[in-house]
Image: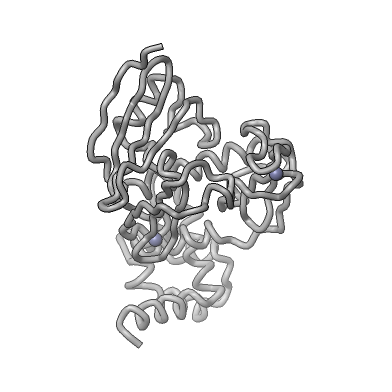
Amino acid sequence: MDDDEEASRRTFELLANETRLGIISTLGEASGEGGYATLAFSDLQAATGVEDNGHFNYHLTKLVGEFIEEREGGYALTLAGIRAYQAIVAYRVTPEVEIEPFEFPHKESCVQCGGTIVARYTDGRFITECEECGTEELNYPVSVADFDPNDPESLLDAATRRMIRDESSMYNGVCPYCAGRVVWTVELPEGHWEESNLRGDAMAHGACTRCAWFLYGNVVGKIRHHPAISDFLSRHGYDPWTDPPWEEQYDFDHQVLDDDPVRVEVSYLADGECLEVTVDSDLVVLNYDIRLIEE
Ligand SMILES: [Zn+2]
Ligand SMILES: [Zn+2]
């Protein structure tokens, strides 16, 4: 076992106890607008709901130093304690939530068969797919806590927020889940166009070097948080920082200029203007230019 494994084994051992998780949750739940809470021993014990002094003190002592620190006035979460509380909240066991397929009018019909696109929620994922042939378009995790299961529109809002956050963070090289470094590569898979509804044949793959979380999709969509591109799109009525990723109000095109070294030119067209962007194999924007389109 190396040092990293030893450290994470210790972390999970410390957290694998109901009383200790309860103490961390209590301090997290007591926090709010004024910042993270500091609770006196007796208040913390009462709020955690443990009656036995010795039992409570034993578990609190185990957490002190790593997840909890003693301060003037009582006990507070350390940074690791805050992270643990965030993980508890994010992965809290929730009842099975399913949303039956409902019409998703935001996308054109299925590229494969012309069928109707529907959206649904299952196994913690927001999915859009063709009702007829089943071809999947979007598939993204959305937390149950972020929407109202009785209101499908709220699922679309939650998916929008989550996808924009993740895409912009990943594009900027930071994993939204573990804060690890993200590396992007541009791939030119042959035949991808035939196999899926993803538009275009230059694909961008961004992967976290620490936790392996990844995003995969057409280059056109994956670079829209570049300042020059988001400025251009915002000026023409589509804001990549707030508008749903599937409501692209612009025309786009792209062509592979070269495959060694990789050079892909992406064009965004709107209101008689064309923004041309060239990216390399690491999805780095090498240059961009706006020109007027002659009718
Ligand atoms: Zn279809
Ligand atoms: Zn990560």
Relative to 38, does residue 57 appear above or below in the rendering?
A: below
Which quarter of the image is occupied by the C terminus? top left
Residue 76 visible, this angle? no
Q: Quadrant of ligand 1?
A: top right
Residue 245 at x, y = what percent?
Answer: 51, 36
In the rendered structure, the answer to whether residue 131 lies left or right of residue 59 reads right
Which residue is at the far top?
Answer: 295
Residue at position x 36%, y 65% in the image = 80
Q: Which residue is drawn at 35% across and 88% down?
A: 1
**Res 225 → quadrant:** top left
Image coordinates for residue 111, horizontal then vertical, percent:
63, 40
Question: Which colour assignment does the render follow?
Answer: one colour
Tell me which residue sits at (44%, 74%) in the image: 60
Report the side of 93 relative to 222 (left or right): right
Residue 123 position within the rendered picture, expressed as x and y whole percent measured from the top left: 66, 58
Q: Nearer the viewer, residue 196 or 124?
A: 196
